Image (spheres, coloured by chain):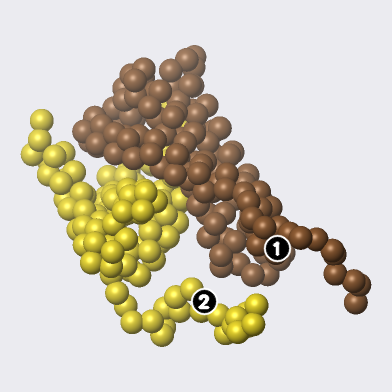
Chain colours: A yellow, B brown
Amino acid sequence: MAGAPSPETRPVSPHLSVWRWHVTMLSSILHRVTGMGLYGAAILFAVWLMAASTGPELYAPVQTFLMSPLGGAMLYLIVAALAYHLANGVRHLVFDTGSGLQPSDADTSAWFAILFAIAAPIGLWALVTFGA
Amino acid sequence: MSAPERSMRTPLGRVRHTGAGHAGTGHFIATRVTSIALAVLAPWFVVTAALDIRDASYLRSIDYLSNPVNAVGVILLIAVGFYHMSIGMQEVILDYIGRPFTKIVLLILNAFVPFVLAVGAIFAVLLVNFGV
């Protein structure tokens, strides 16, 4: 293939330090970051279930942690991460059909996913506090 | 240098449907199929658990997990969620970890840890429901 760039000069994936930040780049990075965060959240989810199955004595410190300010902040962040990963995951399922790939559409849906991540934990908090 | 293999097949034709892992698109499809299930299971769990286990107490947790619908939903969430997160983390490891030894160690851990936690968590749900 004459004229094809050699491997060294091919474009590579975004270098965070040299690329101008834009929202679709942020949405991609956030998807990975929240995915890895949710990996940790799933481990805690398994620990919670196993603690509950062992009886009230071993479960007590889990409740203490979950009801502490640190535990509350953690749960809040987990819900935000889950909401983002969910909204952006749906966005990617739409991309897979070939739709929504126009830069303006992709920007709009990226902002929507970010706003959903901010709104969802507030909405859940309001539902638990003021709801049925 | 040995003589090039005489073949009418183009380089592209030779690698098509193989991919870097020589295993095609199985994980690509599995990620998307599991994400559709998780788009239902994960928000369902977050909302019902937040409403039913407000104080994170032992009794409310056990009450929640003793409901058959909740038990089945949580087991499905664990099975599908841990599979999804294992595939996702594998992609991240393959993207960012270059050193072969570190990469293999992380890939093996990523294959074992979610599996062990998933079995432990599912067993915990069964213990809550059928334990003595």
Return the mark for residue A3. Answer: none
The x, y position of residue A65, in whole percent, is 34, 47
Residue type at mark 2: give it: Val
Left or right: A49 as drawn, with respect to B89: left
Q: Is B93 on the left or on the right of B74, as rendered?
A: right
Tag of residue A12 = 2
Residue in front for this viewpoint, A49 or A13: A13
Q: Which residue is mark 1?
A: B10
Write down the quadrant of residue A70 in the picture: bottom left
The structure residue drawn at horizontal position 51% and vertical position 79%, both measured from the top left corner, is A11
Name the element at disc 2: loop
Q: CA distance from mark 2 to mark 1?
A: 25 Å
Residue A13 x/y as whole percent: 48, 73
Name the one closer to the observer, B78 or A98: A98
Q: Residues within 10 Å of mark 1 (few under 14, many from 20)?
A: few
Determine the secondary structure under disc 1: loop
Circle 1: residue type: Thr
Badge 2: residue crowd in 10 Å (few <14, some 14–19, many ≥20):
few
Q: Residue drawn at (29%, 34%), measured in percent from left and top? A: B44
Say which quadrant the N terminus of chain B sits in.
bottom right
